[in-house]
Amino acid sequence: MITVPKGFGEGLGKDAPEWVDSLPKLAAEFCARWRLTPDGDLLNGYVAVVLPVRRADGTPAALKLTWQDTETEHEALALKLWDGRGVVRLLDHDDEHGALLLERLDHTRTLMTAPIEVAVQVTGELLRDLRVPAPPEVDQVGFRDFAADNAAHGHPVPKPLLDQAVSLVAELTADAGRTLVNGDLHYGNVLGGDRAPWLMIDPKPLAGDPEFCALPLLWNRFTEMDGRRGTRDRLRALADIGELDFDRARAWGVVRAVEGELWALRVGDTDFADVAEALAERLG
């Protein structure tokens, strides 16, 4: 029924090869269980494959099979709580197998190529509107030991920036909220739809402050911002539309940018590490 792309699943974990091998069988099982007919070529991201399908009544939909880890395990729960308000609608799901049946969106149309004013307006409205209490099973925002990670890589993050991030982590996590937030809201994860012009996909649910979510909207389309002033202007526009506390969003931005730089160094992505450090410097 499906052919999984070569290399998909690499880097996900020791059990990933077995899971990848099971995907054709899982796709067939869920098409039978939910009375789905394949309706297009298989798509994939880093942690999931998506098969365009049609339901028994002919309605277009998408069958998503997701690698399950702490970042993805509560995706269906978050989608249920947001209930289609600015996000892709969840039609059915099976948590045990990481299977989600979703409304069909247009994967060829994302906010990555929309006018930046539109992209900022849409994502700012998402930051404003998707505010529901996080259920107890969703993890609170947390971080690795920045100083230890930096030492392990030969101290690439400048000490003043690292010290600032460490101090901000302690300050921000001490009184962080319990709002259900999406740790991976960025322009590539907002697709064109029929029910609404733009709908968010692929949430990585966490409990925290809405301000925590702003940084990916800065490292996406990074080259379109003019230095420190342009970066802060973009963040202020998001904060104004999203009804965020600008200073708290900026502080979270420093923390997440340093975290992003250290992550990029762990996986060998030096280009992303450079962008992350530049953002941390501009926001710090």
Image (cartoon, rainbow, N blue to C red):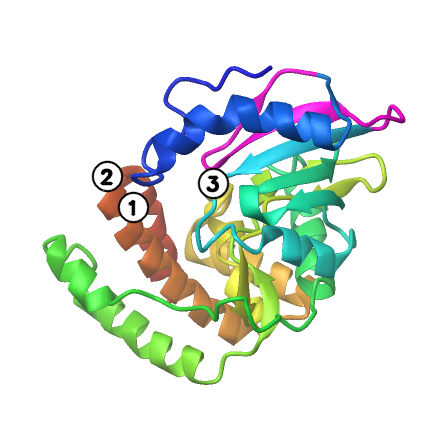
Q: Quadrant of the C terminus?
A: bottom left
Residue to which mark 3 is pinned: 67
Q: Amino acid at mark 1?
A: Ala
Instruction: Indicate the secondary structure of the residue bearing disc 1.
Output: helix
Please provide percent x and percent y for residue 248: 50, 75
Other-residue count near label 2 (Cα within 10 Å), few / some / many at <14 / 14–19 / ≥20 = few
Q: Position of residue 31 (x, y in %)?
A: 69, 26
Quarter-of-image position of residue 236: bottom right
Question: Which residue corresponds to mark 2?
Answer: 268
The residue lying toward the viewer, choosing from 187 and 149, is: 149
Q: Give the residue drawn at x 61%, y 39%.
A: 99
Image coordinates for residue 254, horizontal then vertical, percent: 38, 65
Give, as a single range, the part of the protein colored magenta: 40-59
Residue shown at the point (59%, 52%) measured from the top left: 75
Instruction: Work out whether mark 2 precedes mark 3 in sequence or the reverse, and give the earlier one.
Output: 3
Would you say residue 58 sits in the magenta stretch?
A: yes
Determine if the magenta segment contains residue 232. no
Q: Is residue 278 left or right of residue 54?
A: left
**Kind of residue indicated by mark 2:** Gly
Dots 3 and 1: beta carbons under 8 Å? no
| Callout 2–callout 1 Cβ contact below 8 Å | yes
Is label 2 in contact with label 3 (beta carbons under 8 Å)? no
Question: In this figure, which residue is indicated by the disc labeled 1?
Answer: 264
Secondary structure state at the residue bearing disc 3: loop
From the viewer's perspective, is residue 87 above or below residue 177? above
